[in-house]
Amino acid sequence: MESNDVLEELLIVEAEIQDVEDQIRALIERQDKLYERKSELKAILEACEESGKQVNSGAPGTVEDWSGPFEWDSEADDVRLNIFGISSYRLNQREIVNAVMSGRDVLVIMAAGGGKSLCYQLPAVLRDGIALVVSPLISLIQDQVMGLTALGIPAYMLTSTTSKEDEKFIYRALEKGEGDLKILYVTPEKISKSKRFMSKLEKCHHAGRLSLISIDEAHCCSQWGHDFRPDYKNLSILKTQFPNVPLVALTATATQRVQNDLIEMLHIPRCVKFVSTVNRPNLFYMVKEKSSVGKVVIDEIAEFIQVSYPNKESGIVYCFSRKECEQVAKELRERGISSDHYHADMDVHAREKVHMRSCLAVLNPLSLESGVILAGVLETK
Ligand SMILES: Nc1ncnc2c1ncn2[C@@H]1O[C@H](COP(=O)(O)OP(=O)(O)OP(=O)(O)O)[C@@H](O)[C@H]1O
């Protein structure tokens, strides 16, 4: 074959590939829309079956006004301001709080850093009893518990790192209502693997003390999501076992298909859905060509950090492998940057130590002599 012929065929093949990709994209969009309509129709049908009313085509949840006024408005404002120190709600937060306070199941899609935590933490403080929060990572849980404790809210976590003493306190609070426990964080494995925990939770619910259930990073439920966790699948038991307890599922990243999937999996067909933009105007992206020489790459990273963040602010460097994490952190230290590695292969105490350093820096950077750079891979294990 002449090289011109090859070139010609290559162009044709590339054009065909492009065409197929366009068709696939259009079909996926169409499928997402159909999934959405399917779950709306199923929810309408269920609502009609319950109320015995005529079927109409309006989507559930769309006509309800969650902005208020509600009887808990002034108490909510008081707690928001005086406990959480937040002067006004961000987009959708008020409405979400009101829907949860009204006892509804809620699906929240909100950008990272958009303020999802307040949406369940505020109702958790307002409602009587204990709120259960399922979160995928011990480090995220530690972060939340530390923050809540600093605000004077009795929050605990029940994970592999929990001391025997705290475990006893938590079980007594669940079973007998003793002690001051308002928000309890667990990993999904606790729900799927600990019969003891589930039996205590059942007792808490039976006594009317389970105030709400929150599922953070809910996209982990869906096999279509980017971060599927098998143990999240078993969270379907929560709505089956505690049908009258409001369930809040929160995520920053869920396509229409993932949203539908998790509504189905969590058994919350009549949930109120709040979708805020996932655009983050405060994020700045820059792509730089990477040198093929490892040492030069590290030199460039170090220079970028030192020039861009001369005040030793905290930050994260993501790497592909655990080994690379350790290597990059070590080499940054050698270049005078306070850094540590963080990955799932470290024991929990070593991870906690690194995490606390970074948390301190994030929470109160001025109190540190130097910032911390985490060269880490955050893994959902
Ligand atoms: N209404 C508000 N006004 C000002 N700050 C707020 C408000 N709501 C939340 N925040 C603050 O915004 C920050 C991010 O909130 P939060 O951690 O809840 O975000 P998130 O949506 O859970 O993010 P991620 O997806 O990364 O976990 C926190 O410091 C929180 O105190």
Image (cartoon, helix red, strand yellow):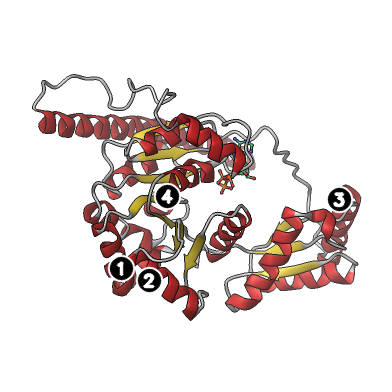
Labelled pair 2, 1 in contact (Cβ < 8 Å): yes
* Residue drawn 61% across the image and 41% down it: 82
- Between circles 2 and 4, the one closer to the viewer is 2
- Between circles 3 and 2, the one closer to the viewer is 2
C-alpha gap between disc 1 and disc 4: 24 Å
**Does label 1 or label 4 sit earlier along the sequence?**
1
Mark carried by residue 309: 3
Labelled pair 1, 3 in contact (Cβ < 8 Å): no
Q: Given the current orientation, which residue lies at the most extreme front position?
A: 178
Q: Say which amino acid is labelled 3.
A: Tyr
Labelled pair 3, 2 in contact (Cβ < 8 Å): no
- Image quadrant holding the N terminus, namely top right
Q: Say which amino acid is labelled 1.
A: Lys
C-alpha gap between disc 3 and disc 2: 45 Å
Q: Which residue is mark 1?
A: 200
Q: How many residues crowd around disc 3 within 10 Å: few (fewer than 14), some, or many (20 or more)?
A: few
Q: Indicate if the residue with disc 3 has its beta carbon within 8 Å of ligand 1.
A: no
C-alpha gap between disc 1 and disc 3: 48 Å
Q: Which residue is mark 4?
A: 218
Q: Which residue is mark 2?
A: 171
